[in-house]
Amino acid sequence: MIGIVAFHILMLLLCLGIATRIVPAQRISDLLGYLHTTIGITTPRLEQVRMIALIWIGSTVLIVDGCLLLLLFIASKVSSG
């Protein structure tokens, strides 16, 4: 439980750092460049990196939360049945 809360707090702090421009755009661009190159998609322009980074973080949080919810759902069905 502590790990889940810590994950959400870290993601929120990262989003706040990106949105308030504390994290430099070039650093975000470099990290997104590695991610996009690994996946095989085009890298965003420097003007777009903040929004794209926030979208990636939001997607990651949704995927993790969805997997945890599915795990809890399956575990509750197995233990009750």
Image (cartoon, rainbow, N blue to C red):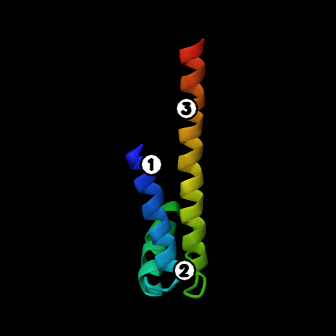
Percent coordinates x, y for residue 3 in the rendering = 39, 48
Who comes first in sequence, dot 3 or dot 2?
2
Q: Are marks 1 and 3 in contact (CB under 8 Å)?
A: no
Label 1: how many residues lie within 10 Å, few (<14), some (14-19) or many (20+)? few
Q: Name the residue under label 2.
A: 19
Is residue 30 or residue 50 the one in the foreground? 50
Q: Residue 45 carries which label?
A: none
Report whether residue 70 is seen: yes
Element class at badge 1: helix
Percent coordinates x, y for residue 55 in the rendering = 60, 67
Percent coordinates x, y for residue 45 in the rendering = 58, 84
- Residue drawn at (45%, 61%) of the image: 9
Q: How far apart are marks 1 and 3 (CA)?
A: 13 Å
When the figure is inspected, residue 81 is found, relative to residue 47, above or below; the finding is above
Q: Distance between the residues labelled 2 and 1?
A: 22 Å
Element class at badge 3: helix
- Residue drawn at (57%, 23%) of the image: 76
Q: Residue 72 carries which label?
A: 3
Report whether residue 37 is seen: no
Q: Name the residue under label 1.
A: 4
Task: Work out which quarter of the rendered image holds the N terminus and state it.
Answer: top left
When the figure is inspected, residue 79 is found, relative to residue 15, above or below; the finding is above
